[in-house]
Amino acid sequence: MAIQFLVTHSGGFHADELLSSVVLTRLYPHARLVRTREADWITPAGDRVIYDVGRDFDAAGLIFDHHQKNPPLRDDGQPYSSFGLIWRHFGRDYLRALDVPAADVESIHASFDAGFVLPVDLMDNGALSPSEAGPLLADLTLPMLLESLKPVFDDRSPDADDRAFDRAMEVARAFVEASINRKAAKRRAEAVVQTAIAAAGDGRVLELPMGMPFRSAVVRAGADHLLFVVHPRDTDWTLTGIRRDEDGFALRADLPAAWAGLTDAALEAASGVQGARFCHNGRFIAVAATRDAALKMAELAVREAEG
């Protein structure tokens, strides 16, 4: 059956499913990209590729997620994100679609995996902090990425440099304007977070009306007592930890170890909270069906953190 749908999760996006989409839309240009969490869509079927959602990895079934209890690992034990799984399964076909000579496919597949895919996988799983990445991310800095858009050496067409410049300028413009917009949004968020901090008082949990940047406002307010943040997301609620440092992944408190990687009934049983839906293996985020369930999970997480 032909692939008609490329299915990933809705809501905020990350590098792994975005880059996976780059690969898959090249291979299946006529397929419809569907961003959703609806059960009917994220159930494997012969007409779709499912990635970064679905809580299962089965290449034969064309589902490529890494959020389950026992996630797929590389041969050396390092974690995959959806991008790594998609690259492992589809990367060679992608290279062939870009007219890479057959004799070079394996070596380029391995080189791109090590230098581009692996850092994305590690960062998505919280196994690598940008501040600690050093040489591993050297080729993924914005200046290097922009320069990679220069023409290849044997493109001798008279307008090659100008065409490449125009393309690179649009990419650069997107990053510059996104950076400015995010800084402005961060300023807007600070007032909302400050109000929420006041409402939290001496409590350990900060409740926000929506997802937004909060760490800098928490630090500026000297709210060192806060451990977790709860806020609505689409049709559910999230519970997240607060990072100790701006550039690191270490949290003021982790979610309970017994919850790691669990979903639905298994997480409800482990936590004792009806409506508990998901806890990331990295124990930095959990999802609940309702506000009450999220707050109950937060209360349990605080209790365990304070021991």
Image: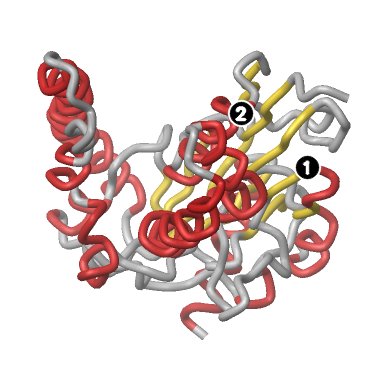
Label 2, secondary structure: give it: helix
Q: Residues within 10 Å of mark 1 (few under 14, many from 20)?
A: some
Rendering coords of residue 187 (x, y %): 14, 34
Task: Using the rendered image of the protein, determine whether residue 205 is visible from the camera's viewpoint.
Answer: no
Judged left or right of residue 62, residue 71 is left
Image mark count:
2
Residue lying at 53% horizontally and 74% vertically, measured from the top left: 78
Task: Report which residue position mark 1 lands on.
Answer: 62
* Alpha carbons under labels 1 and 2: distance apart: 14 Å
- Residue at x 53%, y 52% (from the top left corner): 103
126 up-or-down from 5: above or below: below
The one nearer the camera, 137 or 207, is 137
Q: Is residue 176 left or right of residue 85?
A: left
Which corner quadrant of the image does residue 202 belong to?
bottom left
User: What colouring style does the render use?
Assistant: secondary structure
Name the foreground residue: 234 vs 41: 41
Residue 5 position, x and y percent, is 72, 22
Q: Residues within 10 Å of mark 2 (few under 14, many from 20)?
A: some
Viewer-nearest residue: 4 or 240:
4
Which residue lies at the image location 26% right of the left edge and 52% below the top edge?
Answer: 140
Q: Position of residue 208 (x, y in %)?
A: 40, 40
Mark earlier in primary sequence (1, 2): 2
Q: Residue 207 is drawn in which quadrant?
A: top left
Q: Which residue occupies the extreme bottom position in the image?
A: 307
The residue carrying mark 2 is 27
Q: Please, what is the three-letter code of the amino acid marked with disc 2?
A: Leu
